[in-house]
Image (cartoon, rainbow, N blue to C red):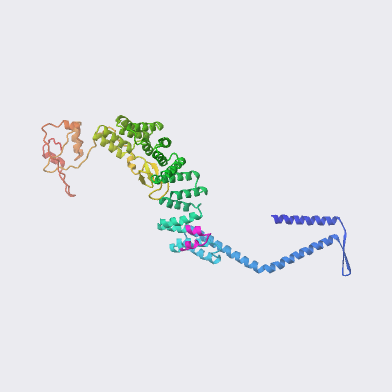
Amino acid sequence: MIRLLGFLIVVFALGLGFAWLADRPGDMVVTFSGYQYQVSLMVAAVAVVAVVAAVMILWWLLKSLWNSPYTISRYFRVRRRDRGYQALSTGMIAAGAGDGALARKKTKEAAKLIRSDQEPLIHLLEAQASLLEGDHEGARQKFESMLDDPEMRLLGLRGLYLEAERLGDRNAARHYAGRAAAVAPQLAWAAESTLEELTARGDWDGALKLVDAQKATRQIEREAANRRRAVLLTAKAQALADSDPAAARTAAIEANRLRPDFAPAAVAAAAAFFKQNDVRKGSKILEAAWKAEPHPEVAELYTHARPGDAVLDRLNRAKKLQEMKKNHAESSMTVARAALDAQDFSTARREAESAIRMDRREGAYLLLADIEEAETGDQGKVRQLLSRAVRAPRDPAWVADGVVSERWAPVSPITGRLDAFEWRAPMERLGQLIDSHDDAPASAAPVVEALAKPTSEKRPVEVIDESRPTGTADKDTESQEDHVRPITAAAFAAVPTDAEGVEPAEEHTRLPDDPGVDPDEEAEKSPRRFRLF
């Protein structure tokens, strides 16, 4: 565009110049070798311009002729390179589509047309073709050769990392990920694998530095980084609780500041304060965590903040927690436990039943069973409550990747993932989530149908049901053979005191071709007598 604009400006300037000369006629006289040449000024200007143009054209022709070998070779080189890049592009598409044969063919074609030191993607295509052909050893060798090239080093580490993951060698995979993270911490796969390695061996400071690097490179959001830092700081505080209480308290306080609603961080920070006899600050931390989300570990530590407190003092502290979070099952459970320890059975029973009404779960029934056993010792009611507890949904627990733990852990024991544990009800007993019908009124006993075949030595079994007319019973007897009606209270009341008891009729297995004994014929041969069984 600039060249075109410059050309137009030059043409416009020449036009103005010729117009100016045309408006001012004159002659130009040139004397050369005794001869005198006289021409008009316009003709002289045209001649000068023509000579300049001719010289420029002649120079261009000579230059083109001189550079023609280089121009021709460059044309063929560009054409060859274009064909190579076309083959490389087709090969990459074939590798992505899983066509190993076409990928290998285009790899060889691209290697012939383009030098591999000029285009590193040829190495990648060759490694991908080897993977598609199942030649993992060749692919690993190609990835290892990439480590010598600074431009291809990260790609080689990525390939070796994936191969180690495929073979299940987590140590090798973490080694390659650590090398990649040291060069480029912005790589998510390298940073995550390195983070798992650091947390697995308990290097919480190294993990914190890595999270800070991820946050600085905008790899993770600020909230996610703060959440991870809180988890790592809580784990550090738990690890240093006995060896370095001061460092543990600092880490726990920072974790609680990042996530005030995180129960493990609040418990760790409050425990550090309680060890230094600073009950007020520790209680404030627990109260803030309880208001955000009631948790049994928070309640346990809060009620036992002062080891020398009496049971009534612990009950009062539990009631204080209940005032902060009313109409919550965990609040009622906390008061019920403290009341049971204080032998205040009425309060304990009331709060436990209130917890069941708000959130029917296993722990509430177990607590109510403990209260029942401690107060009355009625084993029947205790067993009834225990049976309800078995059928009730489980209490919330720390769950990660199908593992249920009573205590929080920073990483999953299955996958090694950071911050995997969640406080929720386990989903192991889905069938028990259906409400039980223990409190429903007892219904009539179901009719039991049995094939009781009388033998020649035993008399037929007859059950008299006085709640029905005799005629109806006879018709049912004729229509339904071997049908035993339910034994009701009325039937037992109608049994005479001098009734003769007999043993139950033995049931013999009938052969497939045995017609058996007709019950009607057997009844005609024997007199009708009342039998209980």
Name the residue located 72 percent from the left edge and 67 percent from the top edge: 61
Residue 215 sits above or below residue 130 on the image: above
> How many marks are shown on the rendered structure?
0
Q: From where the camera sits, is residue 469 visible?
A: no
Q: Which range of residues does the magenta coloring cover? A: 141-157
Q: Quadrant of residue 522 in the image?
A: top left
Which quarter of the rendering shows the C terminus? top left
Where residue 311 sits: x, y (%)? 32, 33
On whether residue 162 falls in the magenta region, the answer is no
Name the residue located 47 percent from the left edge and 53 percent from the top edge: 190
Where residue 247 sits: x, y (%)? 43, 44
Which of the pair 97/252 is nearer the observer? 252
**Residue furthest out toward the top:** 346
Which of the pair 242/376 is nearer the observer? 242
Q: Quadrant of residue 382 in the image?
A: top left
Which of the pair 318/275 is nearer the observer? 275
Which quarter of the rendering shows the N terminus? bottom right
On whether residue 145 falls in the magenta region, the answer is yes
Where residue 24 sits: x, y (%)? 86, 56
Q: Is 92 on the left or on the right of 302, as rendered? A: right
Q: Main secondary structure of the magenta part?
A: helix
Q: From where the camera sits, is residue 532 visible?
A: yes
Q: Is 392 on the left or on the right of 110, as rendered? A: left
Where residue 262 sits: x, y (%)? 42, 40
Q: Quadrant of residue 525 in the image?
A: top left
Q: Is 219 on the left or on the right of 303, as rendered? A: right
Which of the pair 254/135 is nearer the observer? 254
